Amino acid sequence: MTATGDGFALRKTAMPERTKRFWVYDLDRPDRDWDEAHVAEEAGRIVGFVATSWQFWNRRVVLWHIYADRSVRGRGLGHALIARVYERARRQNALAIFLETSNFNVPGISWYARQGFVPGGLDTTLYSGVAGAEEAGIYMVKFLAGRGDPPR
């Protein structure tokens, strides 16, 4: 991500390979932001997880977590998990689905774009004070057919 005169530009840039491990830090927290979750299992073990919440005031589903174990990637699990998000959006009559990811998550951003998500904003200070302080939060949104139009 590069700051320009009056905005920002996302550009794929070569960087050292890194492995970032995630855990669902808020799984047992009573104050967690999400209120619906689904898991995918294979051979008795959890290989995928998706969690969402509903924001009534702007009629959007917020996608808080979506993870697929590396061992099952490329076999449609991400599509099955995101289908659960679309089901919730239909139930709620949502206008959009909204998510945040890191600007370093190039594979994720590319996958979201293939699912119809577009950039919706960014926060250059989101990761301040944590190990990923050099990262920026990228917000992506998928407007649902006939339910809302992006601002012009």
Image (cartoon, helix red, strand yellow):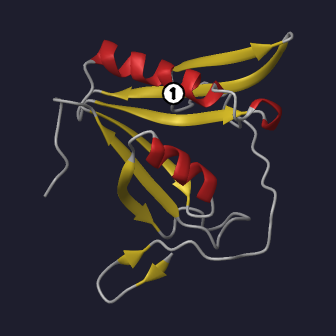
Who is closer to the viewer here, 97 or 36? 97
Residue at the extreme bottom of the image, as rendered: 5
Tell me: residue 113, above or below residue 96: below
> Which corner quadrant of the image does residue 25 belong to?
top right
Image quadrant occupied by the C terminus: bottom left
Q: Where is residue 98 shown, x and y percent of the image?
A: 39, 41
Give percent across and percent down for residue 40.
69, 17
Q: In the rendered view, does 3 fall on the left or right side of 130?
A: left
Q: How many marks?
A: 1
Residue 69 in the image: above or below residue 137: above
The residue located at (59%, 49%) in the rendering is 108
Crowding near the residue tagged with mark 1, few <14, some 14–19, many ≥20 C-alpha atoms within 10 Å: some
Viewer-nearest residue: 54 or 50: 50
| Secondary structure under the numbered disc 1 in the rendered image | helix
Dot 1 amino acid type: Ile
Instruction: Establish if 72 lies above or below 3.
Output: above
Residue under label 1, please give it: 82
Give 75 or 35, whichever is nearer the viewer.
75
